[in-house]
Amino acid sequence: MKVPQCENELAVTELLQSGRWPEACDSALRSHVESCAVCSEVVLVAQFLREEHVHLLADVKLPDAGLVWWKAQLRARREAAELATRPIALAERFALACSLAALLVFVVWRWTDVHTWLGRLAQFGHSDAHWFLSLLLNSLNQPFSIFFVASTSLLVLFMACLVYAIWAEK
Amino acid sequence: MNKTGGSRPEPDERCAAMRELTFTELAQAEDALQNDAAFEMDEASFRAFYNRTARALWAHLAKLTGDSVAADDLMQECYYRFLRTPHAVMNDEQAKQYLFRIAANLLRDRWRRSRGKVTVPLDDAKEVSTAEQTAASVQARSDLNGALRQLKPRELQLLWLAYVEGSSHKEISDVVGLRTVSVRPMLFRARQKLLRILRKAGITGGR
């Protein structure tokens, strides 16, 4: 494709860039632009776009350089921390995967026993619940049972706080 | 542009940003302010560079996305990527070119993600900002903005770099990722397209 060119196009563009068009422009160049299709098109397009530029920036409030700097610092630190803890996260996921795999292997290996146990669990009725509750109540009368209850309660409370802390962190 | 002295952002801007942070991130932020070793460039140099380039970059991003919020986010991303890249050997012009190249890459990713949904969106919300604007001028501007949507993002990008930023064809090719010999014909076609739009809108020069 043959693109029409003019040797004065660059000069006209520079004048537009520097804001010297048309007042501080050479009269010969000005009259050239009036007669040259290429240069007059450049002037029209450039003036339009530069006015768009001024219009865009008229009421804009850009963030302070310090805020941009601070956010960039923060993000860099966060990414560095994530990179540093990535091996730990990978190890945790690997450990979880191994645990699930071990559980699956166990279930498959001892499927008959697991199936029997699940069947008994499904038949856990009112009499069984009553038996379990009476067992629990009788155990409270045993020595040091209060320590067992207190430590179990503390453990449950600690787990709840841990879960809450992790959820709040996210 | 907001101009403040000192090395800290405005308190209300910082408070607004801090509300989005967790406790760990706040601690890291304070640590970061005391130890600026994360980047090659120091804060004073960055401030000077930012003050030179921010307005032009924001206008470029805002025009090509048509969304001032997206322009803010992209601008932050541009400066972050710039800071993360080694650039000690660049002079001011090269650094600015590099910054605009980052912007071009981010814009290209954004356009690819929104392919087919938007051509050249423009921020029509800005058109009713002042009381002096008559209904006719607001409507005319809105119509023009609608017409400008016929321009492809790449076309507007080339025109903006050439006629607003004053970039040479070589600089445009470096920023946008085109061959230098391709810039002239593409720029010519974009210019012709914009001229048809302007002439249809009755804009013939002398604005």
Image (cartoon, rainbow, N blue to C red):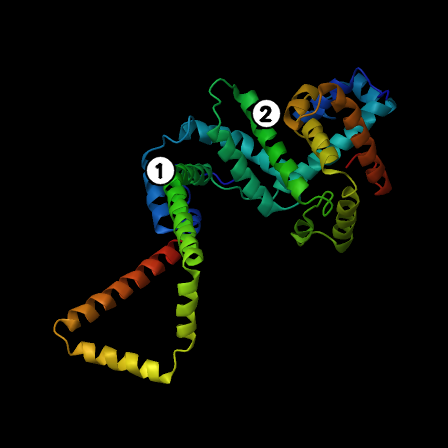
Q: Chain of mark 2?
A: B
User: Does B19 sit above or below residue A160?
Assistant: above
Instruction: Give the residue type at disc 2.
Output: Gln
Provide the residue designation for mark 1: B32
Which residue occupies the extreme left position in the image? A143
Name the residue located 49 percent from the left edge and 27 percent from the top edge: B85
Which residue occupies the extreme front position in the image? A112
Instruction: Name the image quarter holding residue A39.
Output: top right
In the displayed structure image, the side of residue B124 where residue B2 appears, left or right: left
Q: Residues within 10 Å of mark 2 (few under 14, many from 20)?
A: some
Badge 1 vs badge 2, beta-carbon distance below 8 Å: no
User: Does A114 sit above or below residue B177?
Assistant: below
Q: Chain of mark 1?
A: B
In the displayed structure image, the side of residue B59 where residue A1 appears, left or right: right
Name the residue located 34 percent from the left edge and 57 percent from the top edge: A165
Residues A47 and B178: in front is B178
The percent position of residue B11, horizontal first and vertical second, equals 39, 47
Q: Secondary structure at mark 2?
A: helix
Instruction: Give the residue type at disc 1.
Output: Ala
Provide the residue designation for mark 2: B97
The percent position of residue B186, horizontal first and vertical second, equals 78, 27
In the displayed structure image, the side of residue B78 where residue B149 appears, left or right: right
Residues A58 and A160: in front is A160
